[in-house]
Amino acid sequence: MTRVGIIGAGHGVFGRRTDATVQELAFEAFRLALEDAGGIGRDELDAAVVAAVPEYHRQRSVAGVVQEYLGLNPKPVWLTEVACASGSAALRTAWMAIRSGVHDVVAVIGCQKMTELETPEILALMGRVGEVQWESVFGTTFPGYYAMFAQRHMHDFGTTHEQMLAVAVKNHFYGARNRKAFFQKEITLEKALASAPVSSPFCVYDCCANADGAACLILASAERVRELGGGERVVWMDGMGAATASMSVLRRENLVGLPSARQAAEQAYAMAGVGVEDLDVAEVHDCFTIAEIMAYEDLGFCPKGEGGAYIEAGRPYIGGGGVAVNVDGGLKSKGHPIGATGVSMTCEIVAQLRGESGARQVPGACVGLTHNVGGIGQYSFVQVLRRD
Amino acid sequence: MTMFSEFGKVGFVPATKVEAFVEHLRKGRIVGSRCSACGATAFPPRADCVRCMSPDFTWVDHDRRGVIYTFTRTVAAPAGFEEIAPYTLAVVELDAGGRAVAWLGESFRGREVAIGDAACLVPRMWEEGDSLRVLYTVERPPECD
C-alpha cells in the first residue's frame, strides 16, 4: 500500500466570524491549501472529505454546499462526524481512500460555524452532549464531565487546579503568537484563577471557546506526490491510530484518563515505528485543561498521574525538555470550531515539520503527533507525522 | 402506561426496551437487568446482553448503596435545568456493580461532599406542570440504611 503524504495546508482565521458563511470559511482554507501545494488546480483532486458537526448549522447536509462553493462538482464528497474528532476522522477516511487505491489526491476540509445559533439553542444542545438516556436527564454538561475527571485526578494523584491552569497560561502564551488564533493574548495564573466558576473545579479559563473557522489539507499518494513536485515539503502520514470508548462515562473503568487515546497512540506509534523519545512536537486536544494533562499521560509523555508535574515543570514548552505541546495555542487560545479542529492540528504539525512556524517554531522538528478527541474520549484519533 | 420520558428532570428518550425501570422506580425500587442466558447483570439496565448478546433479560433489585466516585458543582446549566442551578452532580460507584450519575439530594445540603463518602440512590417522584417526573437522587447515611 502506498505511503500517504500531505502536499498542501491552508488555515483560516478562527474566531467569531460574523462576516462569513460556513462555505465561505471553507473556501478561505481551501484556496490557501491549493496555493500551498504549489498552486495545483482543482482538476488534480479526485475527491473531497468534509468534517463538520451538523447540528450547529442551519444548512442541512453541509458537505453539499461546501462542495458546490469550492467548485468541486461533480467530484465525490462525503461528511465525517465523530463530534470534536470529526477533522481527524475525515483525514483518516481520505488516508484510507488513498491507501486503498480508490483515489490518489483528496482534499480534506474541516469547517464549522458555531456562532449562528441563538443562546437557547446552544443551551439545549449543551444538555445533550452526553448519553441522553441515563445521564443528560440529570443536567450533565460538557465542562461538567471533564470536571468530574479533574476532581478524580486531583483525588488520586494530587493534581492541583493551579497545574491545570498552567496549561491555559502556556497555550495562551503561544496563542498570542499565532495570527490565526481567536484569543491572541497572554494570561496570568492569577487572572485565570480569578475567573468565574463554571463547574468545579473548573472556571472560565479551564475551558476552550466555541468558534468559527476552517482548515484544509491536500493528501496524495506517494506517486502523485512525485508527479506534483511536492517532494521537498511533503509531510508523511506514517502512523494512524483510532479507537473508541463507551458513550456513557458510567461504563468506563475509571475517570482519570481516556482509554481510547491510549489505544490510538499505541497503534500510531507502532505503525510509524517511533517512540515518545522521537517526538519533537505535539498537538493535543485541550478542550479543558485537565484534558491536556491526561493527554501527556495517555500519550506516554510522562507516567500516569504525573501530568500535573509535567506542566508545572514547564516541560511542554519549547526548550522545556519534554515534547513541545500546543505551541499554536491549542483549542484554548485558538478556539474550537469543532469540525475544523482536527484538521487545524495537523496543519500546525505540517508547518512545524517544514520549519515554517516562525516565532513558535520547535527547532529541528521532524517527527510530530496529533491527538484529537471526540466527546469525552468516546472517539480518539492519534497521528504520527514525519518529514523525511 | 409508563413512558420512559418521565425519567429525569428533562426526558430525551420516549421509549426503550427497559422502560419498566421507571415503573419500578415509582414503587421505590432501584433495579438492574440480569441476562436470562448468561446471568450477566447491568446497571444502568440494558435489554440486550453486551457479553453474550442474548436479547432476554429479567429485572433484579440492585443494591442502591455505594460510594462517591467523583462529583462537580455545576454553575452553567443547560436548558431545563437553569432554575435548579447551581447543583452538584455526583457519580456513585455502587457496591453491587455499575455506576450512576445524579445530583446530590437534601441530605447533603450544607455539607461538603468528598470522594469516597458513603452514599446511595433514593427514588424520587414529583409533578412538574402536567408531567410526572421520576428519578433518583444521591443521598448520605442515615438515608442509606
Image (cartoon, helix red, strand yellow):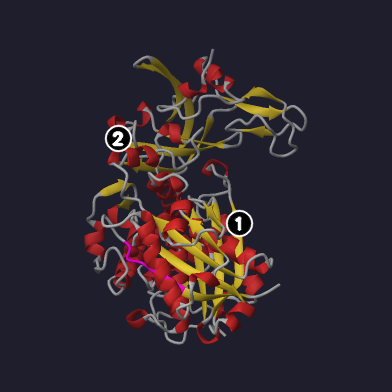
Which corner quadrant of the image does residue A241 belong to?
bottom right
- Count of labels shown? 2
Rendered image: mark on residue B85:
2
Rendered image: mark on residue A243:
1
Side of B22 relative to B88 (left or right): right
- Residue A325, visible in the rendered structure: no
Task: Tell which of B86 and B93 is nearer to you.
Answer: B86
B18 is higher (above) or lower (below) than A382: above
Badge 2 and badge 1 in a common chain: no
Crowding at mark 2 (Cα within 10 Å: few <14, some 14-19, many 20+): some
- State the SS at label 2: loop
Side of A253 relative to A22 (left or right): right
Chain for mark 1?
A
Amino acid at the residue labelled 1 = Ala
Q: Residue drawn at (53%, 16%), measured in percent from left and top?
A: B2
Q: Quadrant of the C terminus of chain A?
A: bottom right
- State the SS at label 1: strand
- Residue B42, visible in the rendered structure: yes
Chain for mark 2?
B
**Could you tell me residue B91's position as x and y percent?**
47, 39
Which corner quadrant of the image does residue B46 belong to?
top right
C-alpha gap between disc 2 and disc 1: 35 Å
In the image, which residues are magenta?
A: A9-14
Q: Quadrant of the N terminus of chain A?
A: bottom right
Q: Do the residues labelled 2 and 1 touch (CB within 8 Å)?
A: no
Of the residues tagged 2 and 1, which is closer to the observer? 1
**Could you tell me residue B93's position as x and y percent?**
53, 39
**Could you tell me residue B51's position as x and y percent?**
72, 39
B111 is higher (above) or lower (below) than A383: above
**Could you tell me residue A305's position as x and y percent?**
49, 62
Rendered image: mark on residue B26:
none
A316 is higher (above) or lower (below) than A241: below
